[in-house]
Image (cartoon, grey):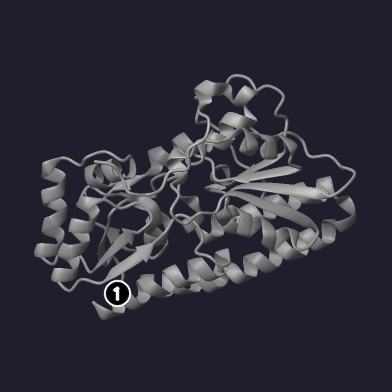
């Protein structure tokens, strides 16, 4: 069984993109130092999610090009084309998710001669409150070790690569982008800083909703077809009851075990959850069956995606996701 998302296919790492060997290491490659440049500033983002954050910081002072903007594309399995590699190599700054999510960017950046300044959002996980700088994966084992499991066997505080659903990580990413742009374009440093601060202020539109969900629906039980909205669920103080084996298999494009499918179906037939969070961007017969069972049980379905819908900014998109979740919980 394969997920029905449209996968953009280019040359694989094995083809080397005519640029040298690719790396299979999913760890952060680190960022090259950003120094003042002559000429226009160009930013390349892995997806339009991070492209939107970069646009909010850059304003009209730089151009932003997002490699993945197709709402039907699956960034997990995207393979870079030679044109993508050239864009990254020639960019003034690269902004990407990291954590193995958009690994094609790490592959390009780690290729010989790709000394490009970058911002890796995943590396900022855990620093979203202090915003002191760019983190490293040295913090990741500690974060994973700190994760605890409740009586249902579900982890709280676990590390998850879908960090754009953590609004404070997005704010920290905007701040890091502003710092890099200030180094590349010192004359406009104050404007970049002001834009990042404005973005952080707008993030409160999202966190105000998740805080209200946590207050109004503490530990409300929910399910997901895959852990895309992990941080939205976590920040909303909800209890994700989905069997981990089911979520992991769907995310990886594998067949869930019959036992995990049965356990997930039972969440709906027994009315054990209040909401189903459903990724419409990557769906198959199994997830469609789970949705049908939720709808048959009159359990609200909240649709989520991995890239921005056309015409929406990051703030608009994430605010709507939080508001949709709030409305579904109120209706359940």
User: Which quadrant, please, contains the N terminus?
Assistant: top left
Left or right? Give the position of 106 relative to 250.
right
Q: Which residue: 15% across, 48% down?
A: 261
Q: Nearer the viewer, residue 69 or 265?
A: 69
Q: Between residue 288 and residue 94, name the one nearer to us.
A: 288
Residue on which the image places disc 1 = 329
Which residue lies at the image location 76% right of the left edge and 48% below the top edge?
42
Write the residue at 11% across / 43% down: 259
Position of 313 compared to 277: left or right? right
Q: Residues within 10 Å of mark 1 (few under 14, many from 20)?
A: many
- The answer to whether residue 124 is left or right of residue 275 is right
Nearer to the camera, 99 or 6:
6
Residue 312 appearing in the image:
yes
Q: Position of residue 209 (x, y in %)?
A: 45, 74
**Total number of numbered discs in the rendering:** 1
Seen from the viewer's position, the closer of residues 193 and 14 is 14
Taking 52 as reference, is 215 above or below it? below
For the C terminus, give its image quadrant: bottom left
Residue 225, given in percent of the width and then of the height, sits at 28, 54
**View extreme (bottom): residue:** 331
Q: Residue furthest top?
A: 21
> Element type at marker 1?
helix
Rendered view: 168 above or below 153? below
291 vs 114: above or below: below
């Amino acid at each position: 069984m394969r997920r029905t998302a449209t996968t953009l296919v280019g040359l694989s790492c094995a083809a080397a993109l005519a640029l040298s060997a690719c790396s299979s290491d999913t760890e952060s490659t680190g960022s090259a130092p950003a120094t003042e440049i002559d000429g226009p500033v160009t930013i390349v983002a892995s997806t339009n999610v991070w492209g939107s954050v970069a646009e909010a910081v850059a304003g009209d002072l730089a151009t932003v090009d997002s490699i993945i903007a197709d709402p039907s594309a699956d960034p997990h399995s995207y393979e870079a084309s030679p044109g993508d590699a050239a864009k990254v190599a020639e960019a003034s700054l690269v902004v990407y998710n990291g954590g193995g999510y958009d690994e094609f960017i790490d592959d390009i950046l780690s290729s010989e001669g790709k000394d490009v300044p970058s911002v890796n959002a995943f590396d900022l996980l855990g620093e979203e409150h202090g915003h002191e700088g760019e983190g490293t994966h040295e913090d990741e084992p500690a974060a994973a070790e700190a994760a605890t499991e409740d009586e249902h066997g579900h982890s709280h505080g676990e590390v998850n690569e879908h960090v754009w659903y953590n609004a404070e990580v997005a704010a920290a990413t905007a701040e890091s982008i502003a710092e890099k742009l200030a180094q590349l374009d010192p004359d406009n440093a104050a404007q970049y800083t002001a834009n990042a601060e404005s973005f952080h202020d707008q993030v409160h539109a999202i966190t105000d909703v998740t805080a209200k969900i946590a207050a109004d629906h503490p530990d409300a039980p929910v399910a997901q077809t895959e852990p895309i909205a992990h941080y939205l669920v976590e920040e909303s103080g909800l209890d994700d009851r989905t069997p981990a084996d089911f979520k992991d298999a769907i995310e990886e494009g594998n067949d869930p075990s019959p036992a995990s499918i049965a356990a997930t179906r039972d969440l709906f037939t027994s009315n054990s959850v209040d909401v189903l969070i459903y990724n419409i961007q990557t769906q198959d017969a199994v997830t469609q069956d789970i949705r049908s069972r939720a709808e048959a049980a009159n359990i609200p379905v909240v649709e989520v995606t991995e890239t921005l819908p056309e015409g929406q900014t990051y703030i608009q998109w994430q605010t709507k996701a939080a508001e949709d979740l709030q409305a579904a919980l109120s209706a359940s």
